[in-house]
Image: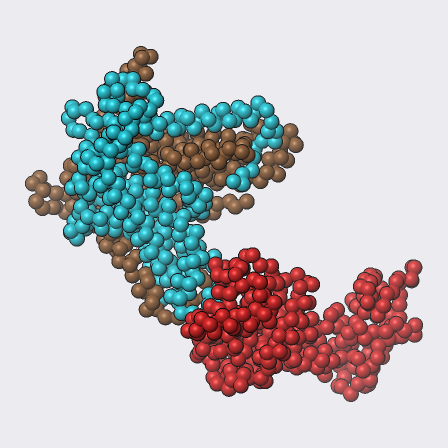
C-alpha cells in the first residue's frame, strides 16, 4: 500500500499510540453487529432466548450451519445461495456486455438518432427500481417472468450506469490507436474485440465487483416477484425466515443465514479491494 | 510502382478551408518532407493521403490509381504516428504483427516478417515486452517496425520524432533516413522542425496556412526561397528581413546603396541570412551589437542596425568576443547573397 | 462528446445499441410511463375498473396528513442517516490518514459493512435491539432503560437510522480517506511551519480542501437514504410503529402492493421520480464541476 501519512507533521510516541487505540475502538464498535451475529450462529437457541446471550462463540458451528444450508427454515439456504449467485452474476455479466456494446456504438460511430439514444440512456441513470416497482412488476408478470431468473435479472440491467462509465473510459482512448488499427486494416468489431475490450480490463473488473454486490444485495425486487420459496434469494429470504405471529424465531439458523448472506460480497470486496475502491471512486466522477 | 500524385487538393472542415490547392508528383522511392508551422495543415495533408481524412476536392493517386474513396487499408500504405499509437496490452511482436494477422497471413510468414523487421531495427530482445516497458526511442522503432512489416507502397510519418529528446532525435533522424533508402519505399514525412526537413528530404513542401509556399530540394529552398515565408522558415537562425527601397537600379538601405538590381522601383523587402554577413571595417552596415551568443563552432551576434533601428542577427564562424566598450561593428555582405521580395505579395523578385 | 475518429456505417452501431435500448424501453421507459399514466386514475371500490381523475391523486397526496408526515419522516431520516454515517467516517478517515503502517488492515476491516446488504444490516441491528432476545436492549434494561422500538416511534427511528448509517460509514470512509490522501502534503507542512497546530490545520486547511468530497458524499448519502434503505425499514419496523418510520419509498410499496391502490402508489412514484430527477441533475451539474487539485 502506498499510503502517505498526513495531517500530522509529528508522528512519534503518544500521538501514534492514541491513534491506533482509537482506530481499534472504532473498528470494534463497527464490527460488533457482525461479531454478534457470528456468535449467535454458533450457539443454541436456548442460549439466545434467555438473555443475555453469550458474547463469545459457542461450539454449535457445524450443527447450525448445516441445518441452515440443508433445511433452513422454509427452504434450504444452499438453494437461496445458488439463486443469489445466479442473479448477481447474471446482472453483472449482462449489464457489462450490453454496456460495452452500447458505449462502443455511441463513441465510435455516427448514426441517426445517436444524440437521442444518448439522452435516453442518460435518463435511465435517474431512476432506481424502487420508484417504478408496480408497473415493472406488471410488465414482468405479463411476460411470465415471475418466479424466474430472467425476471430477477432483466429489470435490473435496464439502467445505464455502466454504459456511461465505459463511454467515459472510451473517450480517453487515444484517437491514434483507432487510426492505427484502421491503417492496420481492422474492421470496427475487430478493433472492439482486439483492442478496446482488452484495454478496458480494469474497468470491467471493477464494474463486475460493484455490480455483483448490487445484484447480490437486492431486496425489494426479489421480494416482489418471487412467491415460490424455492426462488428466494438469500438476502430477501432472511426476512421470510421470521415467523408471523408470536412464534419465536429460530435465531441461530437465521443468524447463520445472515452470515452466509454477507460472506460472498465481503470476499469479493476484500479480495478485489484495490481494484474495487479505484472503480468506486472513479465511477462517481 | 509507388508514385504518389496530388492534384489540386482542397480540404474544408465545415465551412473553413484548411488546404487550398496542393499539387505535387512524387517519384517512386522519394523522401518528401512536408514542413511548416503548427496549424498549417501538414498533418491534414498527410492524413488525406492516408485516407483518414476525406478529400473535399482534388485527387490523390497512389501508384497511379485514384485512391480518394479507398479505406486506409486498401491503399497499401503504412503510418507512423506522433505518439506511436502502440496497442498497450499487446507485446511488441503482437503489435507489429496485428495488421498482418488481420490480412490473413500465415503464422510463419508473420513471424518471419516480424523477426526481419526486428533485426533491422535492433529490437530483437524486446519482442515479448509490452510498450510500457520500453523507452521512447524503442517505442518509436516498434511503430516503424509495424509499418515496415506490411511492405507498403508508401510510408507516412506524422511528426514521429517530436516526443523524443534532442539527442535521440538526431540519432533517429539518421536511422529513419537510412532505413528508407535501404528499403527504397516512397516516404512522406511531416515535421515542424526545419532542421529535420533540411537533412532528410529529397524534396520538401514548405507549407503555410494550407498552401504550398514552395516545393523543391532543400538546397533550392535555402538558396532561392520563393517567398518571404519560405525564406524565414528555412535556415536557422532565421533570415534577417529589412525594409529597403529600389532607386535608380540600386537597392537602398536607408541612404546606403547595397546592391544593384534590375527590378522595378519602389519599396522592397531585403533579406540576408545571418551566416552570409562578414565582419568588415569599412562595410556599409553598422550594427550596435547587444548580445554575443558563443555556441562553440560559431557565435551569434544579436543587435540593431543603426540605420533604421532594425533587429539584426549575425552568425560568425569561430569564437568572437565583445570589444570592451566598443559596441558598434561594421559588416558587409556579398551582393549575390541578398534576397529581394515584393513587400505586398511576399514573392521573390 | 466528440471523438475525432469514427467508423463508417450506421447499421452496425444500431445493432450494437439495440439490446440496451430494448431492455431500457421494456423495463424502464414503459413502466415509468405506465407509472405516470396510472397516477392519473383511481381504482373503484371493487378494484375492477379505474376512473380518470387527472391530478386528483396528487392533490389528495399533498393534502393527506399521512403523506405529509411521510415526507417529514423521510426528511428527518435522511438528515440523520447522513450525519450519523458521515461524521464517524470522517473521524476514522482522519485517524487512518495519520498512519503509515496498518491503515491497510483497518481499511480492510472497515470495508465489511459496505458489503452487507441493507436488509441484512437491518436484521443484525434488529437482533441486537430485539425486545426479547436483544443483547443491547437487555443491557439497557439492566441500567433501568426500557427499550422498545416496537412501541416507541422515536426509538424505532433511531434504530433504523443506525442500521442504515452503519453500512454507509464504510463507503464514506473510503471516499474521505481518498480525499484526505489527495491533500497535498506540502500544503499541510507549510501550515505547520506557519505555526498552526493540528485542529487549526484541520479546520482551516484540510476541511476546506475536502469540501468537494464532502459535498458529493452529502448528495449521494441523501439519495441512498431516500431509496436504498427500503430493506432496513421492511426488516425492522415495516414502517411502524404507526407509520413512525414510513419513509416515502416504503409508502409506495405499502400503498401499492399491500393496500392495492395503484393510482395512489403510482402518483407517489411520480413524485419520487421528480425528486430523484432533480437530485440527479443537481448532482451532475454541481459535482461535475468538482475541483481538481
Residue A94, given in percent of the width and then of the height, sits at 30, 53
* Apparent side of residue C45 relative to residue B186 in the rendered image (left or right): left
Residue C192, quarter of the rendered image: top right
* Apparent side of residue B232 relative to residue B32 in the rendered image (left or right): right
Residue at 36% from the left image edge and 57% from the top image edge = A100
Residue C42, given in percent of the width and then of the height, sits at 14, 43
Relative to A55, say whether B334 is above or below.
below
User: Is residue B348 shown to the viewer in this render?
Assistant: no
Relative to C190, say whether B310 is above or below.
below
Relative to B322, say whether A61 is above or below.
above
Residue B307, quarter of the rendered image: bottom right
Q: Give the number of marks.
A: 0
Seen from the viewer's position, the closer of residues B178 and B198 is B178
Residue B278, given in percent of the width and then of the height, sits at 86, 74
* Apparent side of residue C82 relative to residue B127 in the rendered image (left or right): left
Residue B164, given in percent of the width and then of the height, sits at 63, 62
Q: Colour of chain B?
A: red
Seen from the viewer's position, the closer of residues C104 and B30 is C104
Residue at 52% from the left image edge and 40% from the top image edge = A1
Seen from the viewer's position, the closer of residues A20 and A244 is A20
* Apparent side of residue C22 relative to residue C215 in the rendered image (left or right): left
Q: Colour of chain A?
A: cyan
Q: Colour of chain C?
A: brown
Residue at 56% from the left image edge and 38% from the top image edge = A4
Amino acid at each position: 500500500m502506498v499510503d502517505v501519512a498526513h495531517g500530522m507533521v509529528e508522528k512519534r510516541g503518544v500521538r501514534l499510540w492514541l491513534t491506533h487505540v482509537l482506530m481499534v475502538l472504532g473498528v470494534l464498535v463497527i464490527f460488533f453487529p457482525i461479531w454478534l451475529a457470528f456468535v449467535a450462529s454458533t450457539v443454541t437457541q436456548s442460549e439466545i432466548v434467555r438473555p443475555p446471550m453469550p458474547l463469545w462463540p459457542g461450539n454449535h458451528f457445524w450443527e447450525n450451519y448445516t441445518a441452515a444450508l440443508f433445511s433452513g427454515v422454509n427452504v434450504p439456504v444452499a438453494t437461496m445461495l445458488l439463486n443469489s449467485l445466479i442473479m448477481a452474476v447474471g446482472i453483472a455479466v449482462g449489464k457489462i456486455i450490453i454496456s460495452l456494446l452500447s458505449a462502443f456504438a455511441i463513441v465510435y460511430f455516427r448514426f441517426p438518432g445517436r444524440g437521442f439514444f444518448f439522452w435516453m440512456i442518460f435518463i435511465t441513470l435517474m431512476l432506481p427500481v424502487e420508484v417504478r416497482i408496480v408497473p415493472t412488476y406488471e410488465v414482468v408478470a405479463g411476460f411470465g417472468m415471475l418466479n424466474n431468473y430472467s425476471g430477477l435479472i432483466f429489470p435490473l440491467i435496464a439502467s445505464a450506469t455502466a454504459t456511461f462509465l465505459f463511454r467515459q473510459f472510451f473517450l480517453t482512448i487515444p484517437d491514434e490507436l483507432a487510426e492505427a488499427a484502421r491503417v492496420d486494416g481492422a474492421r470496427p468489431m475487430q478493433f472492439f474485440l482486439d483492442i478496446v475490450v482488452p484495454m478496458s480490463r480494469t474497468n470491467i473488473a471493477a464494474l463486475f465487483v460493484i455490480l455483483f454486490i448490487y445484484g447480490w444485495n437486492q431486496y425489494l425486487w426479489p421480494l416482489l416477484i418471487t412467491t415460490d420459496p424455492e426462488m428466494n434469494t438469500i438476502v430477501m429470504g432472511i426476512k421470510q425466515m421470521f415467523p408471523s405471529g408470536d412464534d419465536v424465531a429460530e435465531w441461530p439458523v437465521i443468524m447463520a443465514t445472515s452470515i452466509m448472506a454477507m460472506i460472498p460480497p465481503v470476499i469479493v470486496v476484500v479480495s478485489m479491494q484495490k481494484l474495487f475502491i479505484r472503480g468506486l471512486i472513479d465511477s462517481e466522477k | 510502382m509507388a508514385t504518389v500524385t496530388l492534384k489540386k487538393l482542397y480540404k474544408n472542415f465545415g465551412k473553413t478551408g484548411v488546404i487550398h490547392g496542393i499539387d505535387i508528383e512524387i517519384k517512386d522511392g522519394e523522401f518528401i518532407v512536408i514542413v511548416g508551422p503548427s496549424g498549417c495543415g501538414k498533418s491534414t495533408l498527410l492524413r488525406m493521403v492516408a485516407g483518414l481524412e476525406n478529400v473535399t476536392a482534388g485527387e490523390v493517386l497512389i501508384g497511379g490509381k485514384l485512391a480518394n474513396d479507398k479505406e486506409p487499408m486498401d491503399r497499401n500504405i503504412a503510418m507512423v504516428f506522433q505518439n506511436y499509437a502502440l496497442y498497450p496490452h499487446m507485446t511488441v511482436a503482437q503489435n507489429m504483427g496485428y495488421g498482418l494477422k488481420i490480412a490473413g497471413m500465415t503464422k510463419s510468414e508473420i513471424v518471419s516478417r516480424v523477426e526481419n523487421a526486428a533485426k533491422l531495427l535492433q529490437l530483437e530482445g524486446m519482442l515479448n515486452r509490452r510498450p510500457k516497458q520500453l523507452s521512447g526511442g524503442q517505442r518509436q522503432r516498434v511503430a516503424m517496425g509495424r509499418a515496415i512489416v506490411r511492405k507498403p507502397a508508401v510510408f507516412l510519418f506524422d511528426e514521429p520524432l517530436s516526443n523524443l529528446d534532442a539527442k535521440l532525435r538526431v540519432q533517429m533522424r539518421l536511422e529513419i533516413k537510412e532505413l528508407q533508402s535501404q528499403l527504397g519505399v516512397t516516404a512522406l514525412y511531416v515535421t515542424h522542425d526545419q532542421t529535420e526537413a533540411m537533412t532528410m528530404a529529397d524534396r520538401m513542401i514548405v507549407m503555410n496556412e494550407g498552401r504550398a509556399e514552395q516545393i523543391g530540394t532543400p538546397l533550392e529552398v535555402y538558396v532561392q526561397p520563393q517567398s518571404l515565408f519560405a525564406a524565414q522558415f528555412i535556415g536557422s537562425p532565421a533570415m534577417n528581413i529589412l525594409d529597403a527601397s529600389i532607386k535608380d537600379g540600386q537597392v537602398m538601405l536607408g541612404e546606403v546603396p547595397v546592391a544593384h538590381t534590375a527590378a522595378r522601383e519602389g519599396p522592397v523587402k531585403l533579406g540576408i541570412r545571418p551566416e552570409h554577413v562578414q565582419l568588415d571595417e569599412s562595410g556599409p552596415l553598422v550594427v550596435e551589437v547587444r548580445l554575443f551568443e558563443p555556441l562553440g563552432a560559431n557565435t551569434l551576434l544579436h543587435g540593431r542596425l543603426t540605420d533604421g533601428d532594425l533587429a539584426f542577427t549575425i552568425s560568425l564562424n569561430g569564437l568572437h568576443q565583445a570589444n570592451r566598450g566598443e559596441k558598434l561593428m561594421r559588416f558587409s555582405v556579398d551582393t549575390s547573397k541578398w534576397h529581394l521580395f515584393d513587400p505586398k505579395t511576399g514573392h521573390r523578385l | 462528446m466528440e471523438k475525432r475518429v469514427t467508423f463508417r456505417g450506421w447499421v452496425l452501431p444500431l445493432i450494437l445499441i439495440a439490446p440496451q435500448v430494448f431492455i431500457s424501453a421494456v423495463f424502464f421507459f414503459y413502466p415509468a410511463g405506465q407509472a405516470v399514466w396510472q397516477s392519473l386514475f383511481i381504482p373503484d371500490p371493487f378494484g375492477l375498473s379505474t376512473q380518470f381523475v387527472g391530478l386528483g391523486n396528487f392533490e389528495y397526496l399533498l393534502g393527506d396528513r399521512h403523506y405529509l408526515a411521510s415526507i417529514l419522516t423521510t426528511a428527518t431520516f435522511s438528515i440523520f442517516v447522513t450525519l450519523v454515517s458521515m461524521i464517524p467516517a470522517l473521524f476514522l478517515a482522519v485517524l487512518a490518514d495519520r498512519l503509515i503502517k496498518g491503515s491497510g488492515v483497518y481499511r480492510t476491516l472497515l470495508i465489511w459493512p459496505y458489503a452487507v446488504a441493507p436488509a441484512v444490516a437491518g436484521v443484525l441491528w434488529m437482533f441486537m435491539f430485539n425486545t426479547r432476545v436483544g443483547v443491547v436492549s437487555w443491557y439497557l434494561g439492566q441500567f433501568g432503560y426500557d427499550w422498545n422500538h416496537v412501541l416507541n416511534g422515536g426509538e424505532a427511528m433511531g434504530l433504523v437510522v443506525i442500521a442504515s448509517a452503519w453500512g454507509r460509514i464504510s463507503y464514506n470512509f473510503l471516499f474521505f480517506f481518498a480525499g484526505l490522501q489527495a491533500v497535498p502534503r506540502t500544503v499541510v507542512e507549510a501550515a505547520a511551519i506557519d505555526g498552526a497546530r493540528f485542529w487549526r490545520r484541520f479546520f482551516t486547511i484540510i476541511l476546506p480542501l475536502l469540501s468537494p468530497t464532502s459535498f458529493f458524499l452529502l448528495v449521494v448519502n441523501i439519495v441512498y437514504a431516500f431509496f436504498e434503505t427500503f430493506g432496513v425499514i421492511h426488516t425492522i419496523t415495516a414502517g411502524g410503529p404507526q407509520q413512525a418510520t414510513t419513509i416515502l419509498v416504503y409508502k409506495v410499496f405499502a400503498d401499492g402492493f399491500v393496500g392495492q391502490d395503484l393510482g395512489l402508489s403510482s402518483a407517489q412514484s411520480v413524485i419520487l421520480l421528480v425528486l430523484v430527477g432533480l437530485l440527479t441533475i443537481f448532482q451532475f451539474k454541481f459535482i461535475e464541476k468538482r475541483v481538481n487539485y
